[in-house]
């Protein structure tokens, strides 16, 4: 029996438990460990550093 395909109270409890566990274990820090401005193509880009591991860069281009 696949719990994720049935509509039982156990399914709801299971999904809430999974969501809570992922929120608690992967919660983002409230303050960055570092921040500043980087020069990019003659302009300045503000950045903040959170957590550890490989960097993930998100840029908004109008």
Image: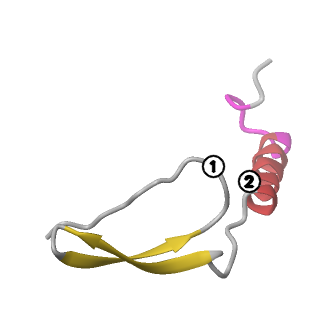
> Mark 2 highlights which residue?
19
Which range is magenta?
4-10
Q: Quadrant of residue 26?
A: bottom right
For the residue pair 36 and 23, the one nearer the viewer reads as: 36
Instruction: Name above or below for residue 13 compared with residue 20.
Output: above
**Callouts 2 and 1 close, C-beta under 8 Å:** no
Q: How far from the left and from the top, in percent, is residue 28?
A: 67, 68
Q: Position of residue 56 (x, y in %)?
A: 47, 53
Most common secondary structure along the magenta stretch: loop
At x 71%, y 32%, the residue is 4
Residue at 59% x, 76% y is: 34
Image quarter (top left, top right, bottom left or bottom right) of the N terminus: top right
Q: Is 54 included in the stretch rendered in magenta?
A: no
**Disc 1 residue crowd, few under 14, some 14–19, many 20+, Cα 10 Å:** few
Q: Which residue is mark 1?
A: 53
Q: CA distance from mark 2 to mark 1?
A: 23 Å
Counting labels gives 2
Q: Nearer the viewer, residue 58 or 24?
A: 58
């Amino acid at each position: 029996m696949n719990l994720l395909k049935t509509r039982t109270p156990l399914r709801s409890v299971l999904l809430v438990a999974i969501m809570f566990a992922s929120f608690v274990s992967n919660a983002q820090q409230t303050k960055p460990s570092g921040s500043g401005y980087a020069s990019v193509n003659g302009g300045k880009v503000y950045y903040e550093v959170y957590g550890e591991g490989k960097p993930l860069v998100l840029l908004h281009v109008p």
